[in-house]
Structure formats: structure tokens, C-alpha cells
Image (cartoon, grey):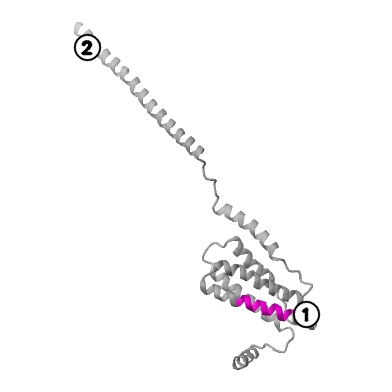
């Protein structure tokens, strides 16, 4: 009871009306904003995978242009819809508790999947309060992000297929052939140079003898 009283006092200090029938709309947005930020901190030091990027962008898409409780397109809910909101909030909080445990354990993959689950519940809450606002599904977000991620990775780190054993053997034979050709050219150059030197020496001796006779 004390904890509830403290929470109520804190809420009222922040200007939150606990009797507002649309309170869940504000709470859902704040909760998703918090877990989204936690996730961003976890992945910001590396290159996000396609799944991580899609999870984050899905949360962004659901939060974008979040309405005020008194916005003209935010509707009043009936009793059955209020019960649906309560169930979505309950499941959302269950996922957030698991999410917090995953953060402590450094389970990024688990956080990636759980952020999607949290966002799905928040999206359903927004759909009930703001039925005319079109929200994308995670499948739509993931498809676009995967295409962008594939393009980015192709630019950053293009992957060439590993050579086959046959290709390696061909490359080795080509290298050996080039070495043999170089050796043969060098040998031919040495052979062609020897007769030329001998001819020059013979011409020199002949000149000396001719000069002597003169």
C-alpha cells in the first residue's frame, strides 16, 4: 500500500491524472520510449544486425507522432475496450520484466525479440485509442530494413565467394607457369649474351694482330 501511495504521489507531482480513462495511452508511450532507449544503448557500440535495426525501427514507427490524450482523433473507449487495454498493459509489463532480466544477462538477442513483443502491445493500445492512425506491422518494417541492411553490408564489406579446390589448383599452376617463363627468359638472355662477348673479344685480337703487321 505504501508503494502504491508513493507512486500516486509521484504521478500527481508530474501532473498525471490517475483518474484519466486515457492514462494507459501516456504510460504505454513512456514505457516503450524507456525500453527503446535501453536497447539503443546496448547496440550502439557495434554494427546493428538486420533484426536489431528492424526491432528498433519498429518501436520508432509506433512512437512517431504519438498523440496527446486530448487529441481530436483519440477516442473514448467502452468497457470492453478498456478491458482489452488492461490486458495489453499486463502483457506489456510482463515482457518488460523479462526484458530487464535479459539486459542484466547481456542477452541482446533476447532483448531484440522482446522489444518487438513490447512494441506490438503498445501498437495495439494505440490502435484502440487512435483507430484512424495507420501503423505498420513488424513484418513490413523487417522487409524494408533487411533490403537496406543487405545494401549497406554490400557497400561496407563486399563478400567474394571462397575459391574452390579446382580454382586454387589452377591459380597455383598459373603461378608456377609464370615462374618457369621468367626463368626461361633469363636463361635465354644469358645464352644470347655469351656469343656476343666472344665475338667482341675475337674482333679485338684480330685488330691487334693486324696492327702488328702494319
Which corner quadrant of the image does residue 128 belong to? bottom right
The residues colored magenta run 84-96
Near-viewer residue (28 or 111):
111
Q: What is the C-alpha distance between the residues marked 1 and 2?
A: 122 Å
- Say left or right for 135 vs 45: right
- Say left or right for 159 vs 93: left
Local crowd size for mark 1, using a 10 Å CA cut-off: few (<14), some (14–19), many (≥20): some
Near-viewer residue (60 or 115):
115
Identify the element where label 2 is drawn: helix
- Say left or right for 132 vs 176: right
Quarter of the image with the C terminus is top left
Identify the element where label 1 is drawn: helix
**Residue that numbered label 1 is attached to:** 81
Which corner quadrant of the image does residue 54 belong to? bottom right
Residue located 35% across and 24% down the image: 187
Tell me which secondary structure the magenta stretch mostly adopts.
helix
Residue 140, position as x, y percentages in the image: 70, 62
Residue located 68% across and 59% down the image: 143
**Residue that numbered label 2 is attached to:** 208
Q: Is residue 76 visible?
A: no
In the image, residue 78 above or below residue 151: below
- Say left or right for 109 vs 22: left
Amino acid at each position: 500500500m505504501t508503494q502504491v501511495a508513493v507512486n500516486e504521489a509521484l504521478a500527481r507531482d508530474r501532473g498525471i491524472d490517475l483518474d484519466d480513462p486515457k492514462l494507459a495511452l501516456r504510460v504505454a508511450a513512456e514505457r516503450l520510449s524507456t525500453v527503446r532507449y535501453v536497447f539503443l544503448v546496448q547496440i550502439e557500440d557495434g554494427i546493428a544486425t538486420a533484426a536489431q535495426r528492424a526491432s528498433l525501427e519498429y518501436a520508432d514507427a509506433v512512437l512517431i507522432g504519438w498523440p496527446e490524450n486530448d487529441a481530436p482523433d483519440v477516442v473514448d473507449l467502452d468497457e470492453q475496450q478498456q478491458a482489452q487495454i488492461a490486458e495489453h498493459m499486463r502483457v506489456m509489463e510482463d515482457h518488460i520484466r523479462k526484458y530487464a532480466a535479459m539486459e542484466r544477462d547481456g542477452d541482446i538477442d533476447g532483448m531484440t525479440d522482446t522489444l518487438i513483443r513490447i512494441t506490438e502491445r503498445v501498437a495495439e493500445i494505440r490502435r484502440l485509442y487512435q483507430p484512424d492512425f495507420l501503423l505498420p506491422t513488424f513484418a513490413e518494417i523487417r522487409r524494408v530494413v533487411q533490403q537496406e541492411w543487405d545494401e549497406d553490408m554490400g557497400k561496407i564489406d563486399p563478400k567474394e565467394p571462397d575459391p574452390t579446390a579446382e580454382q586454387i589448383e589452377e591459380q597455383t599452376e598459373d603461378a608456377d607457369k609464370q615462374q618457369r617463363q621468367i626463368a626461361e627468359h633469363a636463361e635465354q638472355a644469358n645464352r644470347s649474351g655469351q656469343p656476343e662477348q666472344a665475338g667482341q673479344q675475337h674482333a679485338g685480337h684480330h685488330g691487334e694482330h693486324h696492327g702488328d703487321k702494319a
